Amino acid sequence: MFEPRIVCFFCKWCTYAGADLAGTSRKQYPPNGVVVRVNCTGRIDPQHVLWAFREGADGVLVGGCHPGDCHYEEGNHKTMRRVQFLKRTLEDVGIDPERLQLDWISAAEGEKLVHVMSDFVDTIKELGSLELGLKEQEKVA
Amino acid sequence: MKIPYYPGCTLHERARDFDTSARECALALGVELEELAIWTCCGAVYPLVTDSVMDVLAGVRNLSYASRLGDKVVTLCSFCYNVLKRCNNVMRDDEDKRDKTNLFLRADTEARKKVESYTHEDYEGQVEVLHYIEMLRDVVGYDKVASAVTKKLEGLKVAPYYGCMLLRPKNEMKFDDPEQPTIFEEFLETLGCEAVDFPMKTECCGGFQVVNDEELAVSCSQNVVVSALKRNADIIVTTCPLCRYNLDRHQEKMAERVKGFSRVPVVYFTQLLGIALGIDKKHLDFTDNSVDPLPVLAEKSLF
Amino acid sequence: MEERIGVFVCHCGTNIAGVVDVKRVAEELADYPGVAYSTDYTYMCSDPGQNLVKDAIKKHNLTGVIVAACSPTLHEATFRRAGMTAGMNQYQVEIANIREQCSWVHQGDKEAATSKAIRTIKVMIEKARLDEALEPISVPMTPRALVVGGGIAGIQAALDVANAGHEVILVEKSASIGGHMAQLSETFPTLDCSQCIMTPKMVEVAQHPKIRLMTYSEVDDVSGYVGNFKVKIRKKAAYVNRDVCTGCGLCVEKCPAKTPSEFDEQLADRKAIYTPFPQAVPNKPVLDAEHCTYFLKDGKCGICAKVCPLDCIDYEQKDEFIEEEVGAIIVATGYDLYPIENLGEYGGGKYADVITSLQFERMLSASGPTGGEVLRPSDGEVPSEVVFLTCCGSRDTENHLPYCSKICCMYLTKHAMLYRHKVHDGQAYVFYMDVRTGGKGYEEFYTRAAEEDDVLYIRGKVSKIFEEDGRVMVWGVDTLSGRKIEIAADMAVLGLATVPNEAAAKLASMLKIHTDEWGFLSEAHPKLRPVESLTPGFYLAGSAQGPKDIPESVAQASAAASKVAALFAETEYHREPVIAVIDEDTCAGCRVCISVCPYDAAEFDDEKKVARIKEAICEGCGACIAACPSGSAQQKNLTDEQLYKMVSAALEV
């Protein structure tokens, strides 16, 4: 059974707190994602996402505050634009853009986090393992 | 404009007056109700069991037929509307049931092919189920209805009876506010008559309980009729053949029970619409009523 | 220098250890590069647990510490303090969250949870490997508090902060402080008069030398951070020079324009120029332009200006904006009733004799529109049967709100009791789902209503209310006897659900403080930090945080005030130093950072032609870092290098 490896970039104000709420409510979701906590999704450089895929991620989930709720005014807007652009780049290099997902999950939305996480894992399972062949290339080199 | 139309069994039998008046009114408003080429009974009652898909099959089959004709289906009877809309919600929202139901539909394709020219296509809830009055408001538009009115029903006090099936459950039907609906009142204002606000307009008429327990049906419908009478309604309009039956046929018994009871005619809303639009009287057919509406209509110089 | 990192895996009793194989985690990580010490313990946050961490720091000369335990929002501060006492820099102590985001959410798969815990800890080890020793940034503290909302919670908070010796600005949107408590008649369970205990406090606020009271004002904008907020307050045009006005009331008396009174819940009229109620503080009128003849009819009227002996009326007055600096903000915006319009089953407000609980309060109040008499609004008759309904909108998952509004059981009991005291032969019915009487003396109060005042409690919900023959017909069910009930009553009182005041939503989004899905302000921790927001510098008091009765609101207000007083005890505030920094050697001076910074914290050095971050202003959002094309902007202790390594660790097989 293919178990996808997923990196989750969560902003500490909203989605990380939402994930904590899912925990305190004992909601269950698949354990495929490992969370990297950032202050704001606006901190995330597209390079970080590409790096994640290079390092073997099958999917990258970015979770931030709802539009208008960003703790830093508009960091999430910046992310929204970057992610859209990045999805195109991913397509160009042969990575299904669905492997990168951005969602708004507030600190009150433990339930939503569970859905987003579960659905994303399902999506990635359907897409299958991401084979970039980088390791083989390195070996040849 | 053609819109797929699901009449349902009753409109082909006991409620022919409802069917013809609705079709004629629609034509006058530029809409041709295109009856589904194949249709069956909707099942009449939406099942409350949650672990079976058999009970939604009949409804879904009809929706699937409708989907061959267009993206909407219009119906008139409150029961049909309730069942079709809720079956459609299942097909839209419940992935598991959707898949199972489609498997059933696929499985009976062969059997049905012998009698019908029918090929299977998966149905996913894409058809929008509309009640006729929603069609008037949202597709035709009340403005257009108003401008097509040739005879304003002035001076007529009409009690709009919604019954229960159109409105509930509210999260599924999304028809109107289940406690304080207004779609009928707005419709009646469009025709130029006065809508009577009576608190029992959303209470149950007794429905099909009339088959098992007539007493119960009489007391339920009496509650509705008396409430409308108290507020001086000249006439009650309804949208459901069963409501019409209960409110109309039991008035003999009501007269025996309620002191000073005066009978009040119960007609379909499409019949009133027909009068306002100047439809030929033969299509409106007021012959099936226990309480004859003609005297009241004549008194107001409407018929 | 080679890192020497310590890993401390907490069992949290069985909370973590019941799912995650903590022994295996500690053992596996002992072999991870850079880890000098790895262990597990039952309760790492306990004293012995903390000592274990401290001893290990000293013994193994650790350069970094990872505590794998609950969410960092809970104990990051605890362990950073522990690290400091052991001589370590606090910013080299990190938390790996293996409870909320691991053991609690993957209870069915111990193997996968254990493996995720290991990777989660590795992520933090990679971070700690490159964490620098940092010192908190000290910023000066402005020891002045802003309290938003002048109900009982806001009043109490303002008084307590002021009595601790600090300046307070109290902002209230209506013309007087007092809030809903000023509208109440008597209070449960003692039945002492609300106004009598409230008005002295209101006066105290007005006269307190440390409190600056700003009524008819709203918070327009807030910027800055704890210790150094800048607030912009909009003083709404009152068209009355309230500094000069003596409150003689002549203008009010002569004003010809009337409109329903908000204070009297539409049961009586007020004038267009008005003080909300006789005991208002300040007792000076405001002019409501929306209903004023002068404004509606192009200057025809002007009677108030003519009669004012001090020429206070100024039709040209405009909204005024006042900017202030404060160090802390207490939000006490209070509640509203769930709109009666939403309850179509009870008429949705179309029946005159079906009234809200606050309307009934006004009716019971001796200074209310009926002078304390219970009278039907439709015909002014004394009602001989009154039905009280609890849970109107509350505890109704399908149609309305799922939560319990907490106060309705008690105030409806009070209503029924007071009605019986005023109308001795009247019959009071209370429909209830459960009578919730959690509070000192509350159960006894309820028993008294049922037994001594013969209030009839019916366990069941009301399905429909309508008018018939001039009476209010109530259809319900008695679930104890299983019978349907029909009551032909004279009046019905709806115990409408408590919802957050509409101002709260606007304010919460302006202040960037969280709310729950119903709009109540979220506390930092449901048990241990109930009066603070997660965002430093914001404190919560009263019903803005959740339905509350008076004693609870007062207690929370005092608690919030004591938090503020503790904050103000320091003259400096220490901010997290995890902010942006720009490498001047590689910066090309493109100024992208300046354009993306939401705080104007990035500035351009014209001499060196490079950008620079203003330490005191930077909030550490990282927008400039992600935008910097040359990688010259970095976040302290969350550099790109750290992030890359953390991502790699998250993906280790």
Image (cartoon, coloured by chain):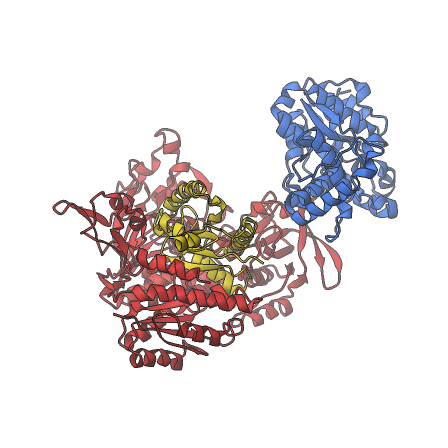
Q: Nearer the viewer, residue A134 or C568?
A: A134
Horizontal and vertical percent for residue B135?
66, 29
Rendered blue, the chain in question is: B
Instruction: Answer yes or no: is residue B90 visible.
Output: yes
Instruction: Answer yes or no: is residue C555 visible.
Output: no
Q: Residue at x 44, y 48 (%)?
A: A66
Horizontal and vertical percent for residue B39?
79, 33
Rendered red, the chain in question is: C
Q: Nearer the viewer, residue C573 or A121?
A: A121
- The number of numbered badges drawn on the structure is 0
Q: Nearer the viewer, residue C289 or B93?
A: B93
On screen, B118 above or below A61? Answer: above
Quadrant into which the N terminus of chain C falls = bottom left
Of all residues, the one furthest to the left in this rendering is C607
Of all residues, the one furthest to the front in this rendering is A140
Answer with the quarter of the image where residue B98 lies: top right
Q: Nearer the viewer, residue C410 or C297?
A: C410
- With A56 as the anchor, is B264 left or right in this view? right
Horizontal and vertical percent for residue C460?
68, 59
On screen, C257 above or below C5? Answer: above
Horizontal and vertical percent for residue B51?
73, 53
Answer with the quarter of the image where residue C641 lies: bottom left
Rendered yellow, the chain in question is: A
- With C173 as the anchor, is A118 left or right in this view? right
